[in-house]
Image (cartoon, rainbow, N blue to C red):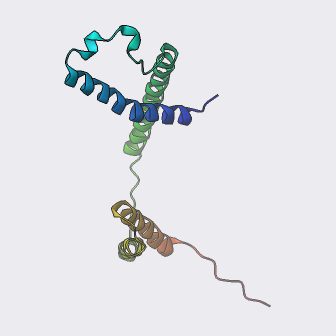
Amino acid sequence: MLSFLQKFLLLVALMVFAAPSAMAQQSGAAASGTADKAAPPAAKQQLLTPEQIEELQGMVGRLQTAMGDLVQAARNNASQIAQNSNQLVLTTNQVAAIAIGAAAGAVIFDFLGGGGLATMTGAVIGGVAGHWMTTAQLDPPAAES
């Protein structure tokens, strides 16, 4: 039994690999004019069997249901956040640590050969690390007796 992710990846692979061949068939038929009309119906190639189409339609239905569940969960979380008006206060040192960490993380990831997305990831990681360093409650090492 295939997992949901495996089925989704299979659907994407079918769409990626089947679409170019279908487009090539359509463009070949348009270029040849009446060549498609002269070919007998048995000679036409069918991309998906009825069972595969039914399975894909079932998968689409499950994906729509899952998407609806995700949207509802996001709405619930957003309403909880909107109703719960907690204020977060950052000190100047914490803001500076986040900015320095973000800049350092972006530079490090850029020097390591990262592209735009990798550099942005480095900035996020650096900012989180900078904030963590200023807010972490580290216990000093215990003195040996």
* Left or right of 54 in this view: 115: left
Q: Nearer the viewer, residue 19 or 143?
A: 19
Q: Residue at x 46, y 31 (%)?
A: 11
Q: Quadrant of residue 119?
A: bottom left
Q: Is residue 13 above or below residue 95?
A: above
Q: Please state the horizontal and vertical placement of residue 121, each as a whole percent of the image.
A: 41, 62
Q: Quadrant of the N terminus?
A: top right
Q: Is residue 21 above or below residue 115?
A: above
Q: Quadrant of the C terminus?
A: bottom right
Q: Please state the horizontal and vertical placement of residue 31, each as a whole percent of the image.
A: 20, 25
Q: Nearer the viewer, residue 100 or 2?
A: 2
Q: Residue at x 43, y 28 (%)?
A: 68
Q: Nearer the viewer, residue 61 or 125?
A: 61
* Left or right of 122 in this view: 30: left
Q: Is residue 66 above or below residue 141?
A: above
Q: Is residue 73 above or below residue 62?
A: below
Q: Residue at x 26, y 11 (%)?
A: 37
